Image (cartoon, grey):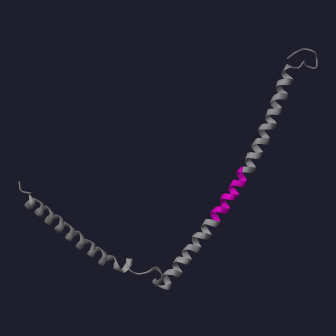
Amino acid sequence: MSLPTAEWTAALDRMAAALDQTLGDLDRHREGWAAVTDTPARAAPPDLMTWLETRLGQWDARLTAAADLAATVEGQLGEREAVVGRWAETFGRWQKLVEQGAGAPSTNGVAE
């Protein structure tokens, strides 16, 4: 029995052609993006680095302002929570006094 070498050879030829086409596509892609991908970061123009540092400084300032605002809001919410807690406590005491007063005899001796 002979091996089907003709079919294998044809399949290998198709794979080789596909690989050649893919490698060609990769080379074209690499050539198209070479200006971006082949330039090391430290070789970037100084203007770009200055611009990036300025932008990062601006973002740092924004983040700091946001953190300060968040801390202020958190403090205000904490104060309001404490006030609401005191009011709830006061109303609870008033409710107990009202309930105790409703069950107590009136000053003229007749229950209300």
Q: Identify whether 37 is placed above or below 93.
A: below
Which quarter of the figure has residue 40?
bottom left
Q: Is residue 40 left or right of residue 98?
A: left
Residue that sits furthest to the front in the current view: 1
What count of labels does the image hold? 0
Task: Identify the residue at horizontal 30%, vertical 78% (top origin).
Answer: 31
Q: Quadrant of residue 70?
A: bottom right
- Residue 55 drawn at (x, y percent): 54, 74
Q: Is residue 9 above or below residue 29?
A: above
Residue 68 lies in magenta, yes or no? yes
- Residue 66 against residue 111 in the figure, above or below: below
Residue drawn at the location 18% of the way across and 64% of the way down: 15
Residue, x 83% and y 27% (percent of image)?
98
Q: Is residue 98 left or right of residue 17?
A: right
Task: In this rendered view, identify the residue nearer to me: 111 or 81.
Answer: 81
| Residue in front for this viewpoint, 75 or 97 | 75
In the rendered structure, does residue 110 fall within the stretch colored magenta? no
Give the quarter of the figure containing the C terminus.
top right
**Residue in the foreground of this view, choosing between 38 and 5:** 5
* Magenta stretch in the rendered image: 65-77
Residue closest to the far left: 1
Which image quadrant is residue 102 in? top right
Q: Position of residue 11 (x, y in %)?
A: 14, 61
Locate residue 109, reporting x and y percent: 93, 15
Q: Residue drawn at (59%, 74%), measured in percent from left and top?
A: 57
The secondary structure that most of the magenta stretch takes on is helix
Q: Is residue 35 left or right of residue 27?
A: right
Residue most extreme to the top: 110
Residue that lies at the very extreme toward the right in this rendered image: 108
Is the residue 74 above or below the residue 27 in the image?
Answer: above
